[in-house]
Image (cartoon, rainbow, N blue to C red):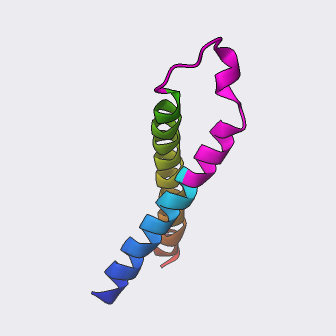
């Protein structure tokens, strides 16, 4: 039962790390330069986009880790 809690905590940490990485990467593009007058909702759009990209990347990473962990069943 305790292993489930550790797994959940690991997933939450990985999700936040990938969202933070995506947010940092998207800020590096300087999207506001594409507009003469950037819309007021541009920061919100950047946060939502980084959340979506970070979530997808984290799920991919966690899926790869699960698949690697399940490779031991192939050998048995």
Question: Taking 51 as reference, is 42 above or below it?
Answer: above
> Which one is in front, 39 or 65?
39
| Residue 36 magenta | yes
Image coordinates for residue 14, horizontal then vertical, percent? 51, 63
Q: Residue 26, position in %: x, y? A: 64, 37
Q: Position of residue 67 (x, y in %)?
A: 49, 62
The vertical placement of 3 against 53, above or below, is below
Closest to the observer: 72 or 31?
31
Among the 4 quarters of the image, the one containing residue 48: top left
Q: Residue at x 60, y 45 (%)?
A: 22
Q: Where, by quadrant of the figure, is residue 5 drawn?
A: bottom left
Q: Residue, x 48% and y 31% (percent of image)?
A: 45
Residue at the top extreme?
36
Task: Identify the image quadrant of the N terminus.
Answer: bottom left
Residue name at image x 70 percent, y 30 percent: 30
Please say if 75 is above or below 30: below
* 28 relative position to 44: left or right: right
Q: Is residue 26 left or right of residue 45?
A: right
- Residue ranking furthest to the left: 1
Residue range highlighted in magenta = 20-41
**Which residue reaches farthest bottom?**
2
């Amino acid at each position: 039962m305790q292993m489930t809690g550790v797994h959940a905590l690991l997933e939450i940490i990985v999700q936040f790390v990938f969202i933070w990485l995506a947010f940092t990467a998207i800020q590096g593009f300087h999207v506001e330069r594409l507009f003469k007058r950037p819309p007021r909702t541009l920061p919100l759009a950047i946060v939502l986009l980084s959340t979506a990209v970070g979530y997808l990347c984290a799920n991919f990473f966690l899926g790869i880790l699960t698949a690697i962990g399940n490779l031991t069943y192939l050998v048995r």
